[in-house]
Image (cartoon, rainbow, N blue to C red):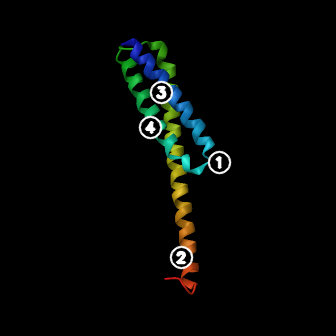
Amino acid sequence: MQQTTNTMAVASLVLGIIALVLLFASGLFQYCIPLPLVLGILAWVMGKNALDQIEAGLGNPNDRGLAVAGYVMGIIATVLSGLGLCCLVGTIAGMLGFMVPILRQMPWGP
């Protein structure tokens, strides 16, 4: 059972790091925001499961730092990805709201 906790803690840490790197890269590529969101949620869940097993005495207490780091990075990536997704949707909605009156003034508009 301790090997499973170690694997989950390391996987949580790796997923959290990848999610944060992709999140910061999404400043260049806005359409990859959902991927850090999914990876952040996975890191969050796996880190929490590893922490629960360690606290129950089923895992190695030395893996607690890895699990906490993955858990925290998963939370940060999820929250920032959610905010980024809201900003992207708001930007698109704002652009559409700006374009509709202009298109209605066109002779071929609705």
Q: Which residue is mark 1?
A: 28
Q: Quadrant of residue 8?
A: top left
Give, as a three-letter code, the residue at label 3.
Ser
Give, as a three-letter code, the residue at label 1.
Leu
Q: Secondary structure at mark 2?
A: helix
Where is 60 relative to 11, above or below?
above
> Of marks 2 and 3, which one's residue comes earlier in the chain?
3
Residue 62: x and y in percent read 48, 13
**Number of the front mark, 2 or 4:** 2
Q: Which residue is mark 2?
A: 100
Give, as a three-letter code, the residue at label 4.
Ile
Where is 2 relative to 97, above or below?
above
> Of marks 2 and 4, which one's residue comes earlier in the chain?
4
Residue 12 seen in this snapshot: yes
Q: Secondary structure at mark 1?
A: loop
Give, as a three-letter code, the residue at label 2.
Val
Q: Which residue is mark 3?
A: 12
> Of marks 4 and 1, which one's residue comes earlier in the chain?
1
Where is 36 relative to 13, above or below?
below
Distance from label 4 to label 3 (Cα)?
A: 10 Å
Q: Secondary structure at mark 3?
A: helix
Residue 94: x and y in percent read 55, 67
Q: Nearer the viewer, residue 40 or 59?
A: 40
Q: Which residue is mark 4?
A: 41
Distance from label 2 to label 4 (Cα)?
A: 36 Å
